[in-house]
Amino acid sequence: MISKKLLPNDGTFKVLFTVLKKGGFPIEAVLQLESSLKEGKPYARQAAITALYSLVGMHNLALKSIQTFIESEVDLDSYAYNVAIYAYGSAGEINKALKTYMKMQDKHLEPDIVT
């Protein structure tokens, strides 16, 4: 999918969420991502893919993917910040994870159980 630049469909996302659950990604975070995708929230697809990249150790792709939505002009919900914090942390980018957390607070988003 990556090399051919194919976009995932609904079936692919169903598998993706199963992989996240079975791979140890926090269940609350998976439910949050599923909900945001069903509601059609901005960058929900990108956040879910980023979570998968991060979970399977594809940190370069995860970090590149984060840039797409964290630097956007669109107001994001906590699910996107949570994925970015997770991805930065798993890639060893602790300062970026903390900066993202602070940016989340600057946007008046309260940390939730996933954060």
Image (spheres, rainbow, N blue to C red):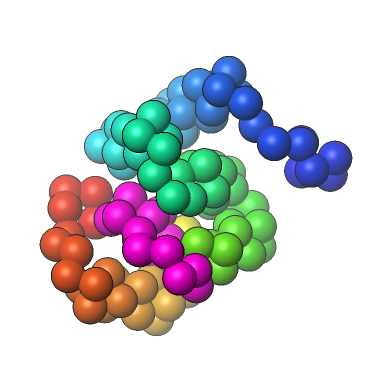
- Viewed as shown, does residue 75 lie left or right of 46? left
Residue 23, given in percent of the width and then of the height, sits at: 46, 33
Query: Which quadrant of the view contains residue 33?
Result: top left
- Viewed as shown, does residue 114 lie left or right of 68? left
For this orientation, the residue located farthest to the top is: 11
Vertical arrangement, residue 58 with respect to residue 68, above or below:
above
Residue 73, given in percent of the width and then of the height, sits at: 45, 70
Residue 36, given in percent of the width and then of the height, sits at: 35, 39
Residue 99, given in percent of the width and then of the height, sits at: 35, 79
Residue at horizontal 57 percent and vertical 63 percent from the top: 68
Q: Which residues are magenta?
A: 71-86
Residue 37 vs residue 31, the one in the foreground: 37
- Viewed as shown, does residue 1 lie left or right of 96? right
Query: Which quadrant of the view contains residue 21?
Result: top left
Q: Is residue 78 magenta?
A: yes
Q: Is residue 71 visible?
A: yes
Residue at horizontal 54 percent and vertical 48 percent from the top: 46
| Quadrant containing the N terminus in the rendered view | top right
Total labels drawn: 0
Vertical arrangement, residue 38 with respect to residue 46, above or below:
above
Q: Is residue 59 visible?
A: no
